[in-house]
Amino acid sequence: MKSLQDNCGVFGLYSETECVHDIFQGIDFLQHRGQEYCGIATYDEGIRLITHYGKAANTFRDRELDYLKGNWGIGHVSLRERQPARWRSQLGEIAVAFGGNVVNADELVEEMKSRGRAFYDGYNIELISKIIMDEPDIVAGICALSKKIKGAYSLVVLTKDGIYAARDVYGFRPLVLGQGPGRYVVASESRALQNLEMELVRDVRPGEIMLINGKGFQTLEQLDSPRTAHCAFEWAYTASLDSIIDGVYVQEARNHLGGSLAERDMDEGGLDVDIVAAVPMSGIGHALGYHKRSKISYQEVFLYNRYADRSYTQSNQSAREKMAKRKLSVLHNAARGQRVVLCDDSIVRGTQILYKVRDLKGAGAKEVHVRIACPPLMYPCDFGISTRSYEELAARQYFKTGNIASMEQLRELEALIADQIGADSVKYNSLDAFVSALGIPGEQLCLKCFDGLDPTESR
Amino acid sequence: MKSLQDNCGVFGLYSETECVHDIFQGIDFLQHRGQEYCGIATYDEGIRLITHYGKAANTFRDRELDYLKGNWGIGHVSLRERQPARWRSQLGEIAVAFGGNVVNADELVEEMKSRGRAFYDGYNIELISKIIMDEPDIVAGICALSKKIKGAYSLVVLTKDGIYAARDVYGFRPLVLGQGPGRYVVASESRALQNLEMELVRDVRPGEIMLINGKGFQTLEQLDSPRTAHCAFEWAYTASLDSIIDGVYVQEARNHLGGSLAERDMDEGGLDVDIVAAVPMSGIGHALGYHKRSKISYQEVFLYNRYADRSYTQSNQSAREKMAKRKLSVLHNAARGQRVVLCDDSIVRGTQILYKVRDLKGAGAKEVHVRIACPPLMYPCDFGISTRSYEELAARQYFKTGNIASMEQLRELEALIADQIGADSVKYNSLDAFVSALGIPGEQLCLKCFDGLDPTESR
Amino acid sequence: MKSLQDNCGVFGLYSETECVHDIFQGIDFLQHRGQEYCGIATYDEGIRLITHYGKAANTFRDRELDYLKGNWGIGHVSLRERQPARWRSQLGEIAVAFGGNVVNADELVEEMKSRGRAFYDGYNIELISKIIMDEPDIVAGICALSKKIKGAYSLVVLTKDGIYAARDVYGFRPLVLGQGPGRYVVASESRALQNLEMELVRDVRPGEIMLINGKGFQTLEQLDSPRTAHCAFEWAYTASLDSIIDGVYVQEARNHLGGSLAERDMDEGGLDVDIVAAVPMSGIGHALGYHKRSKISYQEVFLYNRYADRSYTQSNQSAREKMAKRKLSVLHNAARGQRVVLCDDSIVRGTQILYKVRDLKGAGAKEVHVRIACPPLMYPCDFGISTRSYEELAARQYFKTGNIASMEQLRELEALIADQIGADSVKYNSLDAFVSALGIPGEQLCLKCFDGLDPTESR
Amino acid sequence: MKSLQDNCGVFGLYSETECVHDIFQGIDFLQHRGQEYCGIATYDEGIRLITHYGKAANTFRDRELDYLKGNWGIGHVSLRERQPARWRSQLGEIAVAFGGNVVNADELVEEMKSRGRAFYDGYNIELISKIIMDEPDIVAGICALSKKIKGAYSLVVLTKDGIYAARDVYGFRPLVLGQGPGRYVVASESRALQNLEMELVRDVRPGEIMLINGKGFQTLEQLDSPRTAHCAFEWAYTASLDSIIDGVYVQEARNHLGGSLAERDMDEGGLDVDIVAAVPMSGIGHALGYHKRSKISYQEVFLYNRYADRSYTQSNQSAREKMAKRKLSVLHNAARGQRVVLCDDSIVRGTQILYKVRDLKGAGAKEVHVRIACPPLMYPCDFGISTRSYEELAARQYFKTGNIASMEQLRELEALIADQIGADSVKYNSLDAFVSALGIPGEQLCLKCFDGLDPTESR
């Protein structure tokens, strides 16, 4: 539905008992981070591995879970890569899974090919694994990785000694530690812990390399971090509403972003409307924040189709698209005659929101005021969020170069976008308002898609 | 999630062009009315029929849709029966599908068996079809049906002449007519029309027998209706939020039911709470009505798992239950320290709501006040909603016989239920309040699950 | 490969223990009688039924076999119909399966439709079942069946009392009784018994109606049989080489048919050839008989592809045909420079044998003399062997009407066929030689495809 | 059924038109060389690859064949490894498939691991590919391979330039070249060519490295071959009866081996028996040779179940074994009262032949004389035939060390084996007789499983 997509979730568990059912449920709770592939590897005198094309709940069979014996293991969900990958190397038998993106993958692959290395399927996981396995031990391997690759990663490595976990030095992607009776866990998001009745211990620190086994959590190495650069989109869109990312509740963050939009409306003279509404599911947290701050009544104007995350058997493209477009039904009755504030997290190409505005107007809404939690998207993301090229970003159509430097420029853009999508008004959070609403210092965030500043480049 | 389940949706379409893709999408939009079986029959010099175990979107393949040629056809989704059924009889080749329930099926089967009729698989559809096919033509058959069977049905019959559609004389189950350029349609719910860009024309009348073909809609017969008895649960729970059932918007009905609960709270001295929340998805419409009327802020305290309607590959019962229970995650942050009004549509056994109250308290909610849109369920349903036996109804544990006749009795029950589920308070809409909020005269509704009065029995 | 195809195998078992695994293996051993559908029904307080599209070994899963509880049951394999069929009727719950063909099905269906009966899917099994269930008990039902239907059937009916078994009054299709410790069985062919380590007791007699249960075999009724008319093709082609049909070993019968061809060659001056060979698999028994009688060395000149009974995943018709044609590879080395007697059971259209002769000549065979166990096929079969229309029978191209009445006529035809298929000579067994080699009086055989005489019509 | 199993077949095709359908059929004709995995890679601006678990005919779908575009490609069938493998390396994008076995795989893997190479799944194909890709070009890679690995291989490598093909310097496994109009092909066995209507050109020579493309066949390198060592089992058992391996017809070879056994019987005083028979399918070629030489009549005493190569859906081990044992039915009638010479290719553990002798005696055979084409198996195979350990070889039970050096020792062993399996007599071909019957000089054969001499070790 949204063209912003994360591409991975990782999960690792050390348990006093068989681990596979918890890992299976763990990756099921991370399924929103990647729906195309899933996999589980466990350690039981050697590595047992099963991967699938499809969602975990739809693909893993009983006898496969039975096969995955052992007390520790790792799991993965992904949009693009079949993981974990299992390797036999000088480091013994290991399995590797990661979430993130390697910006300089092509260069690194070429360099390794020139040294005689061959690549099986060209996935990032193969590159990452080979860089690690080039070194004498796993910690050295992860250190080498951090020097060579430009990009974001949250990594788990399964070995006979337990599970190694690491987060890149910028901390782009989330990675948390949790624990329960006799269980130690590492996961991309805290929601997996909560739902498995484990407690969130803390986030893995940027640059931290850990070993998780029967002795609990051990920090084996702390790499220097030039700066922290958490992906701001995790709170605004990617992460699940019930997660806590780097200490900040996702739901609260979204409420504040919506509240900030309400405040701007109030500051700018107030907005005389009947209801606050959301584009489900991405806009709900923001809309409820707007409602809370503005006291304007909240109402649903779209119905999210409960069977929308289905997998179609039809290969017919046009039929599938037709169905996909109907993921949201308009609630005519709720929209008719109303002046609506419609909240969503962001505008990428502007097509989705245009359809939504058109739907509401078609249903008789008198006014539709679009409010967007994120500042305008001006740059593609290199670090694991699959945004498109410049040409596809709506804001870039009007603002060919540079950044939006003032409220005047922002207002100018908002007017043009409102025109494009047929809304009565459009407002974004300015970058300052956005950062301030998140409550995290801007210098600890990656805001590259808004301001173009690459946090990995020194300034 | 809920133990109240409808068991069928029907769809019929006459088109100037190939009909199958619209029928496929039509039943996909009715999938919430039954998730176990689906089927499509079309007419193309004879009847083409394909049925599946599973949901329409997951089971129908391209080549099957290609096979289903013809300009008119019918479709079906169901919890229990594979339909449509195709027959060769003195009426020619026909296909039949229905939604509803035959209360006196066993008697009728025995009677027919004694006359030498044999039954293939014992489904209601076979009984219904045979009663129709015993008569010289389809209209006579449906007339006979209406005399013989006690129960609810919305029926479509596919023939070489077009699609016959009929609704039982009480109008228990919804059935609507719609139309678009060159297309005439009959469907269990209006949402299918809206999403296929057709207009709702009107509801099929109780006892009306229609023929739908190139000439449009024709009423062939209007059977006498002793009274109307629309199932009140359609508005409160069964139907989709974006449907209009017998002229009443489902979303509006739910808003009014929630509003009625708010009003009672206000009349009874006001309720000092922080937020209004819902048990997703069933309680959202009601909660938003409560919020609107009370002006208390609406907030989400549970997260509905987007992949919750999945089909598990694991046959392991305990694992599946574990996963199913985790369909809703608690949003700790939103619940902590809050006094919450929690709305849902109804209480059946009380187990689900008990878990929800426990979840909120576990997350730190200071108070949880449960508000239920329907009056207490006191009787099992005979007309197609699969409620359980008396023993399983929570209210019946405390009120062994008879009905709740006064507000005192209701308050007494509410205190007992609050105690059972650990809530700070519980309030239901009284039957009077419920009917009045729906805005439909009580004598046009079937309220048997609340008051035990069977609308098909003379009084 | 051959366009003569039987269409059913039936199996019934009463056991002192769970019956399903023996039934599963029983139908697996009858799989050569029909490869498209299979099914098993067992009795366990009621009838449990599972049918499949595909072969038994490829389709029945463990949990399905587990579900099919009970000590008695029936099974079925078929080319065209999903069986057994389960019914609830005045006779209680029953399941019915049959092998054979109903010649006057259309008339009977029309007659029943005019009496208000409706047909679900139009299969013969539905008609047969309904005729039985129209009567007050099963024996009366089978009696009625024998009067009404013109055609062949071997029938099993599963009830709470055990398994009813019946064979039509002509005994067209085989049906045998067998027994082992605590087990009583009825099956289309004795090979199922032998491989299940049970003993062949006897054939069910034409017109015999039996009940098989804990008391063993009981003859409930013996209908008058105007005459016996065993299908002669069973010995020549249909039945498995390891079966005994109506007291005659199939392998021995084929050896005798081949021997008879050798004798004719010897009588007619001897045939100066190097080797005897067969078209696998259908011609092997005949070729070995020719070899035995003639003392000419036997050699294989075709290789039967071990994976030939595969099911192709490709839907592409031309690709499948290409593959199918290559079911037999030529053994060039064995054919080169040889004068070959090539035996097969029969010639239908002549296409297959033409390809085989061409293959051998292409591989360098000096001479190819085709010897055919059956007399020329002159009439289509009505009783369950799916032969084609007159137009498709090779012999009918040359002999437009009437029968082959003399050896002169036969030789004339043989010369024409030899010409057509490019063989150096062709010889068939004459009808007299055929019957005499089988060792069964001609008046006990159905020879309609050779002489056109319908055994069910009085003469 | 037999515990001797080859493990691969390779196929490569350069065509003027789309190549995939011929490759698909090519591997289908090689399916007897490996039934667990199959795969096809084609070149079309890059490598397209699809592999499957299962047989080619059962797994490849239309749309997959459609996807495999291009004019040249390779295919593979295997018992143990998913192939071809696709790689990106300094040699560009390539796909590799091989048949054979690497004896020193573990050592080589360790050596490469110590140099920092990591292995994805531990298959031989990965090792072979990496050795090749370590070198600057493919020819150099194959040269390096031939130096490093001890073992047997027939190899195809798909590149943008065409298909490289190579055979190890001993020529263990067969590999042939063929051609048709506009098509050049390389395949494990000539049967694939014959059935695709292409002509056999010649065998690839041991140590030859070729390139196949639009220019036809080019020999790029001819490695020195210390000696030739064709696997003798190919003619006796592995290859298909319709293939020609290194210039010798498989069928003829088997006929000669059977003839040699007959000769020994005649030399040793003659054997007074009624019929010669075979254990299908492996013994047929041998039995027909015995029959031809001895003039004793050939008869079938077992029926090979046409559906025996099925894949069972049941996971139940005991049920599957039960079914598997019944792959051959005894033809009671043919065996009863007969004195039988029963031919087979070899005896591994002796279990299968024991069951067969028991079956015949149970059916009433008066005498059963077992004749085995191969000499006694005394050593496990290292070069790609999956024989078991010493302990499992029947002959080794009696002859604990050393070789059978004289006819006396052979007769002694034969008596012991006859006793073990309940036969009236057992005779093997002596090693001399075996080699002489094959008509290939012993120094060009690998006979290690008989004499223990490893052809790769200098003597």
Image (cartoon, coloured by chain):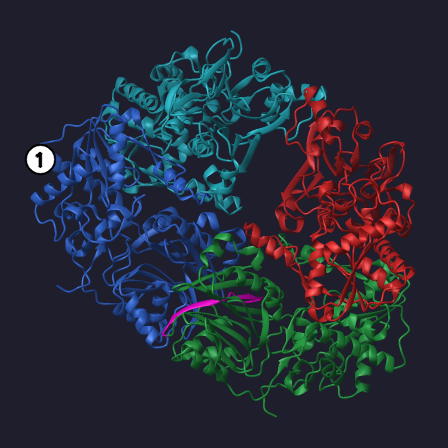
Chain colours: A green, B red, C cyan, D blue
Kindly identify which residue carries mark 1: D268
Residue type indicated by callout 1: Glu
Residue A254 seen in render: yes
Q: Determine which quarter of the picture holds residue A424.
A: bottom right
Q: Is residue D105 above or below residue C201?
A: below
Is C410 one of the magenta-colored residues?
A: no
Q: Chain of mark 1?
A: D
Is A84 one of the magenta-colored residues?
A: yes
Q: Residue at x 48, y 38 (%)?
A: C55
Q: Determine which quarter of the picture holds residue C205.
A: top left
Residue A12 in picture, x, y percent from top left: 51, 69
Magenta stretch? Answer: A76-90
Residue B323 in picture, x, y percent from top left: 61, 57
Residue B22 seen in render: no
Residue B241 in picture, x, y percent from top left: 80, 55
The one of A241 and D349 positioned closer to us in this rendering: A241
Quadrant in the picture for the C terminus of chain B: top right
Residue B79 in picture, x, y percent from top left: 68, 43
